[in-house]
Image (spheres, rainbow, N blue to C red):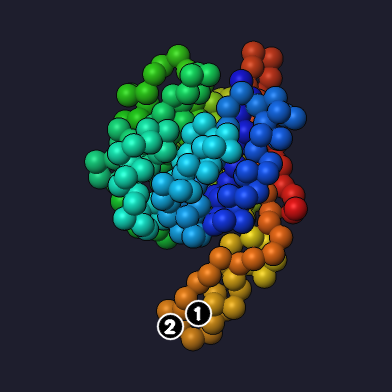
Amino acid sequence: MRILFFGDVVGKSGRQAIQKYLKKLRDELSADVVVVNGENSAGGLGINRKSIEELLDAGANVITTGNHAFHWKEWKEVFDNYPMVLFPANYPGLLERSHYTTSSGLTVMNIQGRVFMECIDNPFLAADRLLEVVPKDTFKLVDFHAEATSEKLAMGYYLDGRVHAVVGTHTHIQTADERLLPNGTLYITDVGMTGPYDDSILGMHKDAVISKFLNNRPARYEVASGRCTVNAVLIEINKENRDIKRLSFIE
Ligand SMILES: [Fe+2]
Ligand SMILES: [Fe+2]
């Protein structure tokens, strides 16, 4: 099983990069399945039908989300009509919409952290509940959408040996700590983002972000333009080998 996972896709620029590179990389890397975090795919914040359709059309098999998933009212329409679009398991009532099993036999699960984030249900207990309901004899990957590196590593070790991979999303910056944990789970703290690179702070134009830091008043964020960065990981799981490789480039 070879899984290609793209970090948070930001706005139109991120969607265009996915349209340009997803199938190319999938073919070049012989990936069986492609997972994309789409929580910022509509206008830089949230999801809508258009952004989801574009990601699916580009070849995504499963789309994960996170704290920004609910930004647009249209999230509910996506929730009702696209079972392969996942929402974090530890929001009240969302457990059943937080996992999906592809025809190729990969179960993807979406959980969100709560350190420096919204105080939702305990993500570790949510992981336990998820593992009770997902199909047993499939490959298992968790997108842990979280801010704190400690919480992410703790989730990696907590699930070590119980799932095949735990990949972090949300910070939009790729970390260089990909590794195989002692009991066989592949792990990275954050995959990074697929979105605007030049004059960009995590995908948003730098001026409004700097202004907010300077003035402590709300500022209107806009998705940056210019070149796009693509950040992903390729995960390989077979009898002889378990491996995770980072991919990162600026187009
Ligand atoms: Fe994000
Ligand atoms: Fe996020």
**Residue 225 in view of the camera:** yes
Q: Position of residue 162 (x, y in %)?
A: 47, 25
Q: Position of residue 250 (x, y in %)?
A: 74, 54
Q: Nearer the viewer, residue 82 or 157?
A: 82
**Is there CB contact under 8 Å for labels 2 and 1?**
yes
Question: On the image, which quarter does residue 10 sit in?
Answer: bottom right
* Direction left: furthest residue: 93
Crowdedness of circle 2 by 10 Å Cα count: few (<14), some, many (20+)? few
Question: On the image, which quarter does residue 35 sit in?
Answer: top right
Tell me which residue sits at (53%, 70%) in the image. 222
Q: Disc 1 marks which amino acid?
A: Lys
Pointer 1 residue = 212
* Direction bottom: furthest residue: 215
Left or right position of 117 against 168: left
Q: Is mark 2 within 8 Å of ligand 2?
A: no
Left or right position of 62 against 22: left
Left or right position of 100 against 198: left
Crowdedness of circle 1 by 10 Å Cα count: few (<14), some, many (20+)? some
Tell me which residue sits at (53%, 19%) in the image. 104
> Residue 217 has which mark?
2
Left or right position of 66 against 120: right
Q: Disc 2 marks which amino acid?
A: Arg
